[in-house]
Image (cartoon, rainbow, N blue to C red):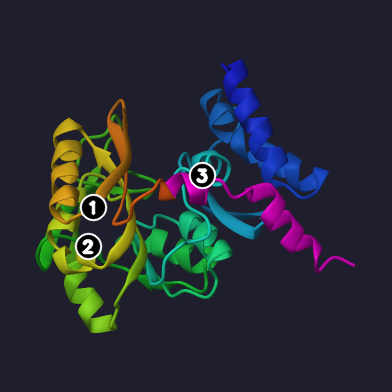
Amino acid sequence: MITRSKLRAFLRCALTLGRTPREQFKILWALSKNIRARAYWAPYNPERVYKLGTVIGDIYLRDNFGDVTNLYPLFVENAYRVTCLAYPGEILDVGANIGLFARWIHTYNPERRLHCFEPLPSNAAMVHKNCPAAIVNQIGLGRRAGTVTLGVDQHGVMASSIAQPWSLEPIEIQIMKLDTYADEQGIGEVAFLKVDTEGMEVEVLDGAPCVLARTHQIALETHGEARHQTSLDRLRGAGFRIEAEERTGRTGMIWASHHEGDIFEECAAHNFDAKVWEGEQEGVV
């Protein structure tokens, strides 16, 4: 059953992202897929990739239970509290999933080099489609080079080191240290580091002391109280100022920077609708 709050969120998302009534309807229809699937009105077809027109251009989603659920938190709520970056450096998206955040951050910072890390082949292919400008690395990150066994759902939506309420199949993935990658790529300053690795967040931080030392801003998703507290300790130990943190159920978020002042609130204050929509309209005849 759809609640009023969910319906309002769907409508807000469609109206915010769609440029035309047709695009808005297609977005609204896509957002309703999980409800229709639970009611046995529409089966999933995870192999099918479909396109939605939005104010930041075409984005691509798979017909599964997970991809479309990212639209509202990423594009409407600005979950990572970042738009135009305030400090110099490159962008690192660790746990890129299908590249929707990469597309978001590249829209606002098209001149910066953007590195995405996504170990699942099906997800990495989607990153290429959603953000062709990104450097896509089909590899995981950890505290040392080697392999790790993660659980993958039947639709290949995510690879996780933590238990999920649905069945997971084990898969072995290659991992490397972020410091090693940065040395190989000649990465100096990092303007923004985003980490969402489904339970591997502490391992990623442990493999990146040098990168953290020259990172201006970080937004990190945590999983479980212990990982949340350990992540806070690691970031404070690396000299970060914790701008904000929150815990909601099984997950949490940490926003931190090496600078004084509420830098994340300043970045989030940019008006997404006006900025991107005006940019789109400049080319309309």
User: Whole-Å distance between the Cαs marked 1 and 3?
Assistant: 22 Å
Badge 1: residue crowd in 10 Å (few <14, some 14–19, many ≥20)? many
The boundaries of the magenta stretch are 264-285
Amino acid type, residue under disc 2 in the picture: Leu
- For the residues bearing labels 2 and 1, Cβ distance under 8 angstroms: yes
Identify the element where label 3 is drawn.
loop
> Circle 3 is placed at which residue position?
78
Q: Mark 2, residues whose alpha carbon is within 10 Å: few (<14), some, or many (≥20)?
A: many
Reading the image, the residue beneath label 1 is 240
The prevailing secondary structure element of the residues shown in magenta is helix
**Three-letter code for the amino acid on which mark 3 is drawn:** Asn
At mark 1, the secondary structure is loop
Quadrant housing the C terminus: bottom right
* Residue drawn at x 24%, y 62% as measured from the top left: 140
Q: Position of residue 6 (x, y in %)?
A: 58, 24
Residue underneath mark 2: 212
Which numbered disc, 2 or 1, marks the residue that appears first in the sequence?
2
Q: In this view, does 110 lie to the left or right of 203?
A: right
Closest to the observer, 174 or 203:
203
Residue 176: image x %, image y %? 17, 68
Q: What mark, if any, has residue 146 been given in the picture?
A: none
